[in-house]
Image (tube, helix red, strand yellow):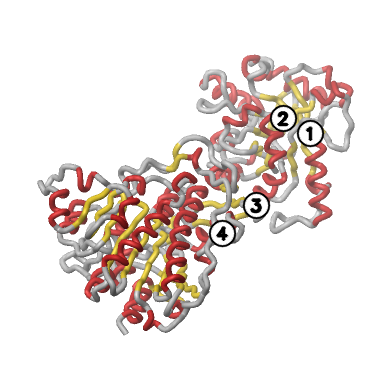
């Protein structure tokens, strides 16, 4: 695959500026609702016109019975191409250097039809006859290869892999188009080709590339599986009768692929659009940093305390991967050689989340149900339907038991999920109301990004820095000080608000480790700690697979820290789950040997897909099964209050 992509980059340097990793060829283009324009709007860089010469006029159609005087080659293709080429200042597309290829299939005898095509195109020399103009390839009833030199140099010809060409003749070959059924008689575009047929296809591709030419297969099946199979095999030009579907599959290609040790995304930033008020300062996923050089280390637990008596539960570490569905977990696992710490937990369950007022939940409703053990409403933060009555959260329950409590997020500290553990209101965007709870909160540790909440000027005139200190908090701005700072701690470290990358991949794990140490010091009766991997959700909203995988890696490293402590302590229950799924992530293909994952998001919003539950430690098997989100917390309550 790498060799094929390298070949294509050398062969077609202008393709680097195109939208897709392959050339899309609009086959049978005349059958489109708007011939030429539909394919052009989908950024197909190769478009085919089937042409007959009838009474001196070049007409478009697959068969003679399809021909109409008004369906002329000039009207349907030549003039639209000239119009767009000149309107774009001598380029096929305003924002791309990709070169357009026009394939003209001669349906009549080679002559005089080919001479008529050439004469028409020569009327527009700036468009069709220049080195930077539209590339013209003749297919169908092409002239004998010995006659290639008889035609103008701006015209190239479709080659046949069964033919041998002299160097001069090969120079006039624009590409090799071959009948796919010559190599594979059975493959229907689903699953894997039979080995002999796959071998024949690979040899055909290799022969075309050895000649320095791209290859296209016609008469092939068309499906999503066909698209990514041909891409992996190194087919340079994808034949499609459905340009919109093919374009949708290949667009934003870098954000659909993760390869361990390699960059899959182009330079730039993905996902800077604000999701809600609490994510206003998120700078986006820096594409050039969406690379992990080697697999992350995972933790193999001892299982000594796994499913021990719930009476042994002293501490609870509750980890929430915001937006993390089953496929987020498996995408990260496949990229990491099928290894994640959370997958080493034996107790697994399925969580269903639906709020009271909708079918699909958000972080506020989902997080609140996990925090309180009660059904919730969208956008609400641990409160009843109108916000008039607070619903106690797990930090309240554990605090009443004399245990220390903490809330840690790899994101904005006032965002919905962490807020559900220390605040109560009917609107997740009421940030000043949410943060005002810090003035009275009994939670021992609150940690995330968002320094302006404390250091900025509030519209209500409250001096937050003074207020939080009056409430007994030590205010720090670096997670490294969590476990060495006396008293309750409000840690607002804006590094926690940045996207995960190799340089900071263990930041949440470090903060988790230090939070555990700090909470141990705060009470000899145990602790409750909620840890959120916030930006798995952001990656889903931005529809970027590399970011989703890397954020899940970061989260899993924190899970490993929790499991490591649970083994050393023997009285700690670890629960891993999500508040909802984001993006409808679908896994399409991959390679365990290279850590390659090909996946796509079907949405940029939350979906009603179920999410995983993993548990480890005393009482862990109580979390096996399928249940609604608030029931998970009710199970936890029943275990710790026995």
Q: CA distance from mark 1 to mark 4?
A: 48 Å
- Residue 631, quarter of the rendered image: bottom left
Q: Position of residue 104 (x, y in %)?
A: 72, 30
**Residue 73 image point, x, y percent:** 66, 28
User: Helix, strand, or loop for circle 2?
Assistant: strand
Count of numbered badges drawn on the protein: 4
Image coordinates of residue 63 in percent, x first then y, are 74, 39
Residue at x 64%, y 38% (from the top left corner): 22
Q: Nearer the viewer, mark 3 or mark 1?
A: 3
Position of residue 466 measured from the top left corner of the image (x, y, whole percent): 13, 50
The residue mark sitting in front, 1 or 4, is 4
Separation of residues labelled 3 and 1 (CA atoms) = 25 Å
Q: At x 51% / y 50%, what residue is drawn? A: 545
Asked if residue 170 lies left or right of residue 361, the reply is right
Is residue 610 at least partly visible in the picture? Answer: no
- The residue that label 2 is drawn on is 104
Q: CA distance from mark 2 to mark 3?
A: 25 Å
Residue at position x 20%, y 64% from top? 442
Q: Determine which of the numbered discs, if any, sits on residue 140 in the image.
A: 1
Q: Which residue is mark 3?
A: 223
Quadrant of the frame with the C terminus: bottom left
Q: Are marks 3 and 1 in contact (CB under 8 Å)?
A: no
Is tag 1's residue or tag 2's residue first in the polypeptide sequence? 2
> Pointer 2: residues within 10 angstroms few (<14), some, or many (20+)?
many
Q: Earlier in the sequence, mark 2 or mark 3?
A: 2
- The Cα atoms of the two marked residues, 1 and 2, are separated by 8 Å
Disc number for residue 327: none
Asked whether the viewer can see residue 113, the reply is yes
Q: Which residue is mark 4?
A: 333
Horizontal placement of 383 versus 97: left or right?
left
């Amino acid at each position: 695959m790498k060799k094929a992509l390298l070949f294509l980059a050398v062969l077609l340097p202008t393709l680097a500026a195109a939208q897709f990793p392959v050339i899309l060829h609009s086959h049978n283009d005349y059958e489109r609702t708007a011939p030429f324009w539909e394919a052009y709007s989908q950024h197909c860089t190769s478009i085919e016109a089937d042409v007959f010469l009838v009474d001196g006029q070049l007409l478009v159609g697959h068969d003679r019975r399809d021909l109409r005087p008004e369906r002329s080659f000039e009207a349907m293709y030549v003039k639209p191409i000239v119009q767009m080429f000149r309107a774009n200042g001598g380029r096929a597309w305003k924002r791309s250097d990709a070169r357009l290829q026009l394939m003209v299939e001669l349906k009549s005898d080679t002559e005089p039809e080919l001479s008529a095509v050439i004469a028409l195109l020569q009327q527009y020399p700036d468009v069709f006859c220049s080195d930077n103009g539209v590339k013209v390839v003749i297919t169908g009833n092409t002239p004998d290869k010995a006659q290639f030199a008889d035609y103008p140099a701006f015209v190239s010809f479709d080659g046949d892999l069964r033919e041998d060409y002299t160097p001069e003749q090969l120079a006039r070959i624009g590409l090799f188009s071959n009948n796919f059924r010559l190599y594979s008689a059975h493959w229907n575009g689903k699953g894997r080709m039979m080995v002999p047929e796959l071998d024949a296809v690979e040899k055909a591709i290799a022969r075309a590339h050895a000649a320095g030419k791209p290859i296209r297969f016609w008469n092939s099946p068309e499906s999503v599986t066909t698209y990514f199979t041909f891409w992996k095999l190194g087919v340079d030009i994808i034949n499609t009768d459905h340009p919109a579907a093919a374009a949708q599959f290949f667009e934003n290609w870098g954000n659909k692929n993760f390869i361990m040790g390699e960059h899959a995304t182009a330079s730039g930033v993905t996902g800077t659009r604000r999701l809600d008020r609490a994510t206003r300062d998120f700078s986006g996923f820096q594409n050039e940093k969406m690379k992990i050089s080697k697999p992350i280390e995972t933790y193999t637990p001892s299982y000594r305390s796994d499913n021990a008596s719930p009476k042994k539960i002293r501490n609870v570490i509750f980890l929430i991967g915001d937006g993390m569905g089953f496929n987020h977990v498996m995408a990260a696992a496949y990229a990491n050689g099928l290894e994640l710490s959370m997958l080493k937990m034996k107790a697994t369950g399925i969580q269903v989340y639906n709020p009271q007022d909708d079918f699909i939940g958000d972080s506020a409703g989902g997080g609140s149900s996990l925090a309180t053990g009660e059904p919730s409403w969208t956008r609400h933060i641990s409160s009843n339907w109108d916000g008039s009555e607070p619903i106690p959260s797990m930090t309240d329950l554990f605090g009443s038991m004399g245990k220390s409590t903490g809330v840690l997020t790899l994101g904005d500290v006032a965002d919905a999920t962490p807020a559900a553990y220390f605040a109560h209101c009917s609107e997740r965007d009421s940030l000043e109301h949410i943060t005002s709870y810090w003035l009275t909160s009994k939670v021992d540790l609150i940690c995330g990004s968002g320094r302006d909440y404390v250091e900025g000027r509030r519209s209500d005139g409250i001096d937050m820095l003074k207020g939080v200190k009056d409430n007994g908090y030590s205010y720090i701005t670096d997670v490294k000080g969590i476990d060495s700072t006396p008293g309750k701690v409000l840690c607002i470290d804006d590094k926690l608000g940045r996207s995960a990358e190799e340089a900071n991949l263990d930041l949440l794990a470090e903060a988790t480790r230090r939070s555990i140490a700090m909470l141990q010091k705060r009470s000899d009766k145990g602790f409750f700690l909620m840890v959120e991997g916030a930006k798995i959700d952001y990656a889903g909203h931005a529809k970027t697979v590399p970011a989703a995988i890397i954020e899940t890696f970061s989260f899993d490293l924190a899970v490993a820290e929790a499991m490591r402590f649970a083994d050393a302590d023997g009285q700690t229950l670890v629960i891993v789950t999500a508040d909802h799924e984001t993006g409808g992530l679908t896994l399409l293909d991959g390679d365990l040997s290279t850590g390659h994952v090909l996946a796509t998001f079907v949405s940029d919003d939350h979906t009603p897909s179920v999410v995983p539950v993993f548990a480890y430690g005393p009482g862990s098997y109580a979390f096996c099964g399928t249940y609604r989100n608030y029931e998970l917390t009710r199970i936890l309550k029943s275990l710790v209050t026995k």
